[in-house]
Amino acid sequence: MKKAFSVLASLLLVLGLVLASCNGDEDKDNSDVLSTESTLTEWKYDPNIPEGFDGGGDFVFLVVGGDDEAYHSVEIGAEELNNELINDAVYTRNKFVEEKLNINIVCEYDMDVPTRASTAIGSSLDVYDVIMPFMNDAPALALNDYIVPLNDIETLQLEREWWDQRANEQLSIGHKLFFTTGDISMLDNDCTQGIMFNIDLIGMYDLANPYDLVKQGTWTIDELHTMARAATQDNASEYTDSWGFHINGNGATGLYISSGHNLIAKDEETDLPYVAVDSVGAADAVERIRQLMTDKSFVIIIEDYNAAAQNDGFVNCYRAAAWAIAEGKALFRYMSMSDTLRLAEYKSCNYGILPSPKLDAGQDGYASLVSTLAVPGVCVPSTNDDYDRIGIVLDAMAAKAKEVITHAYYDTLYQYRVAQDDESQEILDIIFNERTYDLGVVFNWGDCRAMVNNSAISSASATWSSTVDSMLPAIEAAMQDTIDGFNRLG
């Protein structure tokens, strides 16, 4: 049953959102995003709802959820206000859209969205308007003809600012886009990779301001290397020692992407993928990353100390890595954005966020990899009989999310910081505006996703070119199978 949405409730909601904003800065002006006039009665980003449109009842999403310890969707369903910033922003968006479009947003959760969706769609049941599996699970749904190309939905305004244009461009194959993301989701932000750093240690070791390096275009692997060495204690061996750089074992792929290379690239004209790991300079990039990740004088691999961390009472090594940043035991930590939430219990932590570094300063921009393993893709089931309605509702939800939920997300990233600085927003914009979706990470043809990671943490003498040569036939064959399958869909 739809809840009443009175003016008084609206005012209380706005007050609650502002009070829940984490930075505690009384001088911060939230009126541009959370005013009663713009947020609750008007569109800041107008989705151009057709005059007289009537959504006609339930609009049902199937999203990942049910396990609080895993990645799951929190940006579609919100049953009531609970004074949590994201939940209340989602509730605000939903009530606004429901009133404007005369719909009732229904959110169903399952940790195995592909199986549940396949069961329904395979039985020709029209029970979901939108399904949001993790992106790496979406290709199988497309190849089974269970979801339709989003760019075939005439009312869906994929070119608008609330859809991620880099996702639209980079995730299509042969000009068919079966899944994408944008402001309607937050896990694309959560799973964007970057680097967390302890601001206090920068001053303690009299190091260059990393924010300045980013804005000057000179934030590189070499700069990270130099700064991390300066912050590592002599003979460091345990994770509790002072280290310059903590990095996940699979962080090498993110460093490879930020070095200006791809696993899989696409032909601009045909929009068809091709293997890019043998491109000019790729071998040099992989070798440079290998040198960094195997240099135990300043780098520690996070997964290597999982047992020690658990023996010390941590849930896992990733919680211990958060401790290391918070307690000044680590200068830099490679991460996904969601890792900032692990700092919740460290109220005095003064940290900043940086993009993944360039290989050299001559590169254009900073490419931050999106780890799509836990990023929901917006998909439309092939069993639905009203695609025009779906396009209109999706645009409305994403447009209002850009105004309300995205702002709340940015605030949440920094809610446990001591220092609130204007540069943080600028750096986050750089990271999110230049993030990269690699088809090799999504489709993992021939296990190409593991190529860089395995090479970067190996001390074996095998060259990158020999690795590529041995894996290339399987990658190309699997990729061609996908292209052929998409062509058969018409």
Image (cartoon, rainbow, N blue to C red):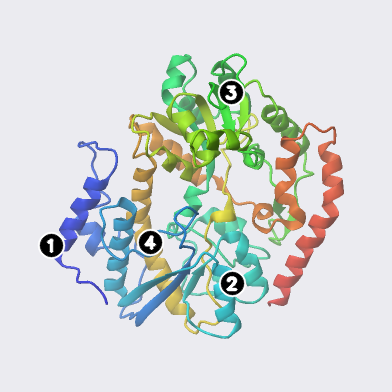
Q: Nearer the viewer, mark 3 or mark 4?
A: 3
Q: Position of residue 478 (x, y in %)?
A: 78, 61
Q: CA distance from mark 3 to mark 4?
A: 39 Å
Relative height, residue 484 to residue 450 (above, below): below
Viewer-closest of 178 and 131: 131
Q: What amino acid type is highlighted by mark number 2?
A: Thr
Q: Position of residue 112 (x, y in %)?
A: 55, 66
Q: What amino acid type is highlighted by mark number 4?
A: Ala
Relative height, residue 32 to residue 77 (above, below): above
Q: CA distance from mark 1 to mark 2?
A: 43 Å
The residue at which mark 1 appears reads as 8
Q: Nearer the viewer, mark 1 or mark 2?
A: 2
- Residue lying farthest to the left in this orientation: 8
Q: What amino acid type is highlighted by mark number 3?
A: Glu
Disc number placed over residue 401 in the picture, else none: none
What element does badge 4 sit on?
helix
Q: Nearer the viewer, mark 3 or mark 1?
A: 1
- Of label 1 and label 2, which has the lower sequence position? 1
Tell me if label 4 and label 1 are in contact, CB under 8 Å: no
Q: Is residue 75 left or right of residue 455?
A: left
Q: Position of residue 463 (x, y in %)?
A: 84, 36
Q: Residue at x 37, y 79 (%)?
A: 58
Tell me if label 1 and label 2 are in contact, CB under 8 Å: no
Q: Sort mark 1 into few (<14), some (14-19) or many (20+) by Cα contacts within 10 Å.
A: few
- Of label 3 and label 2, which has the lower sequence position? 2
Q: Is residue 251 left or right of residue 316?
A: right
The residue at which mark 3 appears reads as 223
